[in-house]
């Protein structure tokens, strides 16, 4: 079910939606092309899926294209992603060739005609080759933390990135010094999407039954792609330590994005470690399992996000929006989503996560308060409407091209 902007009024208030309509008037008819590397799976696709139809409702001629690549390309870009996060990788001339070949193929197949091209993350960054001076504006959106890359990683993308008019980062600490204007825009969740909308108890129960999960003991959950940086193995270890004290079950719900070739290997490792323990539910969900994820998050007593690296953890905001107490690693942007012991818990170790699982299972009132505070923080800062407003301001900024002022 698609929501209209007016459906957001009960959630965010009339004023917020009116402001969006006013900004939309300033951009009416502008052709805004978004390009990323996967239509399903992961946070970027999640946001574009909602954002593009709403921008269109405002009269902006928004489109969304996805680059195509072969396996070599996605292995390379996954390595690049890890290296931008700091994992050492040795890039060879052959890697550059693979990247350029796929970029060129996409330059031939994607219609890049637009007033503003909004290119997301490193994979499609090379499309900037199509720039020839005056043909519209180019924005590069970086969703990951590139503040401490491994040697060679930033250098791999810098010659492309530096040709854009504007770069957009999720947080000041993710950004880099560059010769182009930068703006800071946090991602968001959509409170009306199937992933986040209210569900009735019977809808939640129906999903659990379908997934073979009995709601007869507390549920500890992590929802994340099966990716080493999400540390699913650490989650199992922490849960095992905690269950010695409180009988509880564990759900590891994930899937893999089409641009992530490592997913299957990580899932295999996780399954092996989980063994045949009936209290561990490892769920390999299809990319459109939004209601399932919603129900799992709502049914959870405690939600974990034990990432070793993270950009902005959308799953953290999703769980907080559902008023769940969240225990998360204090990495990436997560400390701006959670204030320790106020709107969630920040930890850095498996032992720390285990300790806090026990604490929260043993103190439901405190856990409820964390969830309530977390929900309010998301309402104020991390909903889609705020995100749309920021993007539209950035579009106005590049479209105008006049110094550092946004003219409205
Ligand atoms: N997600 C999903 N299915 C899965 C795993 C994750 O739909 O099997 C969603 C999750 O609910 C969230 C997004 O994918 O909306 C993940 O965003 P996040 O920022 O947490 O991590 P990323 O995958 O972008 O690193």
Image (cartoon, helix red, strand yellow):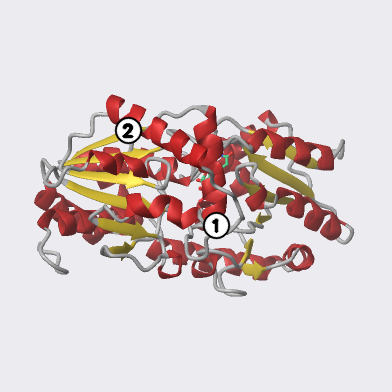
In the foreground, 396 or 292: 396
In the foreground, 373 or 293: 293
Q: Position of residue 123 (x, y in %)?
A: 42, 41
Q: Position of residue 305 (x, y in %)?
A: 63, 56
Q: Which image quadrant is residue 2 in?
A: top left
N-terminal-most mark, 1 or 2: 2
Question: 10 Å neighbourhood of mark 2: few (<14), some, or many (≥20)?
Answer: some
Confirm or reject: label 2 Cβ below 8 Å from ligand 1.
no
Q: Residue at x 55, y 57 (%)?
A: 85
When the figure is inspected, residue 357 is found, relative to residue 392, above or below; the finding is below
| Residues at marks 1 and 2, CA–CA distance in whole angstroms | 25 Å
Mark identifier at residue 65:
2
Is 381 left or right of 364, judged from the image as shown?
left
According to the picture, the residue beneath numbered tag 1 turns out to be 85
When the figure is inspected, residue 318 is found, relative to residue 290, above or below; the finding is below
Q: Residue at x 40, y 69 (%)?
A: 172
Question: 10 Å neighbourhood of mark 1: few (<14), some, or many (≥20)?
Answer: many
């Amino acid at each position: 079910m698609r929501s209209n902007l007016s459906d957001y009024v009960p959630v965010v208030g009339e004023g917020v939606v009116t402001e969006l309509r006013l900004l939309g008037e300033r951009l009416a008819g502008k052709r805004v092309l978004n390009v990323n590397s996967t239509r399903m799976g992961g946070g970027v696709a999640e946001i574009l899926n909602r954002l593009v139809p709403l921008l269109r409702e405002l009269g902006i001629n928004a489109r969304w294209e996805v680059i195509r690549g072969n396996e070599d390309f996605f292995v390379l870009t996954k390595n690049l992603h890890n290296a931008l996060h700091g994992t050492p990788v040795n890039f060879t001339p052959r890697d550059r060739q693979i990247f350029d070949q796929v970029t060129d193929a996409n330059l031939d197949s994607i219609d890049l005609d637009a007033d503003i091209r909004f290119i997301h993350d490193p994979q499609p960054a090379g499309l900037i080759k199509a720039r020839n001076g005056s043909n519209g504006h180019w924005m590069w959106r970086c969703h990951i933390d590139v503040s401490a890359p491994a040697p060679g990683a930033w250098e791999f993308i810098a010659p492309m990135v530096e040709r854009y008019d504007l770069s957009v980062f999720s947080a000041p600490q993710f950004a880099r010094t560059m010769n182009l204007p930068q703006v800071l825009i946090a991602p968001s969740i959509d409170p009306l999407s199937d992933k986040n909308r209210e569900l009735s108890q019977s809808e939640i129960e129906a999903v659990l039954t379908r997934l073979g999960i009995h709601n007869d003991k507390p549920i500890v959950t992590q929802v994340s792609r099966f990716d080493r940086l999400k540390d699913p193995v650490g989650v199992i270890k922490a849960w095992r330590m905690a269950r010695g004290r409180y009988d509880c079950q564990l759900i590891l719900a994930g899937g893999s994005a089409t641009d992530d070739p490592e997913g299957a290997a990580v899932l295999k490792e996780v399954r092996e470690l989980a063994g045949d323990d009936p209290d561990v539910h490892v769920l390999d969900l299809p990319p459109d399992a939004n209601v399932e994820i919603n129900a799992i998050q709502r049914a959870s007593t405690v939600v974990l996000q034990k990432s070793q690296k993270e950009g902005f953890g959308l799953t953290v905001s999703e769980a907080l929006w559902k008023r769940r107490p969240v225990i998360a690693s204090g990495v990436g942007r997560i400390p701006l989503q959670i204030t320790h012991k106020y709107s969630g818990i920040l930890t850095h170790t498996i032992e720390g996560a285990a300790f806090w699982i026990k604490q929260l299972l043993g103190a439901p009132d405190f856990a409820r308060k964390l969830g309530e505070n977390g929900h309010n923080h998301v309402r104020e800062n991390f909903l889609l409407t705020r995100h749309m407003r920021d993007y539209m301001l950035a579009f106005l900024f590049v479209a105008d091209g006049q110094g550092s002022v946004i003219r409205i």
